[in-house]
Image: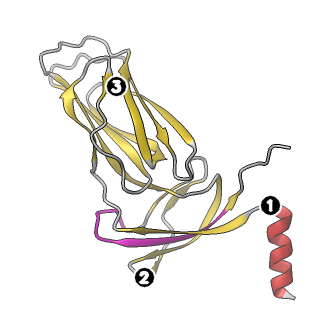
């Protein structure tokens, strides 16, 4: 009877259960190498091995940047088209992405102001510390394992379908996540 109840509950709310295994995900994979910051399309140097957020490092040795956007386009954890526009108008600093990219097609910088062009403003993009789960709409993560041991479930974003594991990603841990999600809506 308990099994029937769980199935009925699962069907009634329309969600499904999923599992994702991430073997040795590494942060810091260079997506765009360090280059002068200009308003242009940047060369994508490498792809994320796992769906991960993209972090942006802006250096401005003579603080002058007051506006600018970095737009990352690619594919998400379940193959969906994904675009993230990051406002970098605060100038120098690290900007943490919120969306997890499985692949990156283009990185475009636009609207940056007061560019000296002499190398005093640079930009670098690399993979971050947050994993994307391969589902349409994440409902919840109910179990996390790190290296085969049960761990406390890390920070989950149902908005972006991501998780920041309790044990930080560093390229030497295996993770397993069990989660519930909503399927892609059917077109009738």
The spot of residue 175 in percent (x, y) is 43, 71
Q: CA distance from mark 1 to mark 3?
A: 42 Å
Q: Residues within 10 Å of mark 3 (few under 14, many from 20)?
A: some
> What residue is shown with label 1?
14
Q: Up-down: is 54 above or below 66?
A: below
Sequence order check, earlier mark of 1 and 2: 1
Q: Secondary structure at mark 2?
A: loop
Residue 99, horizontal then vertical, whole percent: 49, 44
Q: Residues within 10 Å of mark 1 (few under 14, many from 20)?
A: few
CB contact under 8 Å: marks 1 and 2: no
Residue at left offset 36%, top offset 56%: 49
State which quadrant residue 87 falls in.
Answer: top left
- Magenta residues span 167-180
| Circle nearer the N terminus (1, 3) | 1
Instruction: Judge by depth and name the residue closer to the eye, 3 or 61.
Output: 3
Give the residue pinned by disc 3. 90
Q: Is residue 70 above or below residue 32?
A: above
Q: Is residue 169 magenta?
A: yes
The residue lying at 71 percent from left, 57 percent from top is: 182
| Marked residue nearer the N-terminal end (2 or 3) | 3
Q: Is residue 66 visible?
A: yes
Percent of width and height locating residue 40: 32, 19
Q: Tell me what residue is drawn at x 50 percent, y 43 percent.
A: 75
The residue pinned by badge 2 equals 148
Task: Say which of 186 and 51 sits in front.
Answer: 186
Separation of marks 1 and 2 at Cα, in angstroms:
30 Å
């Amino acid at each position: 009877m308990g099994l029937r109840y769980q199935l009925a509950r699962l069907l009634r709310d329309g969600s499904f259960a999923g599992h994702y295994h991430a073997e040795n995900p590494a942060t810091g994979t260079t997506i765009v190498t360090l280059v002068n910051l200009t308003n242009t399309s940047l060369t994508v140097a490498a792809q994320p091995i796992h769906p991960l957020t993209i972090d942006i490092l802006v250096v401005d040795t003579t603080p002058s940047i007051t506006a600018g956007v970095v737009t990352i386009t690619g594919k998400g954890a379940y193959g969906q088209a994904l675009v993230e526009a990051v406002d970098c108008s605060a100038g120098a600093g690290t900007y943490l992405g919120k969306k997890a990219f499985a692949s990156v097609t283009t990185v475009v910088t636009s609207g940056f102001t007061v560019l000296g062009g002499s190398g005093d403003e640079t930009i670098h993009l690399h993979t971050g510390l947050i994993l994307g789960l391969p589902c349409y709409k994440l409902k919840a993560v109910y179990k996390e394992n790190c290296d085969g041991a049960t761990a406390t479930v890390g920070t989950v974003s149902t908005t972006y379908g991501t998780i920041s594991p309790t044990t930080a990603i560093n390229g030497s841990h295996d993770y397993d996540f069990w989660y519930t999600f909503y399927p892609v809506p059917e077109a009738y």
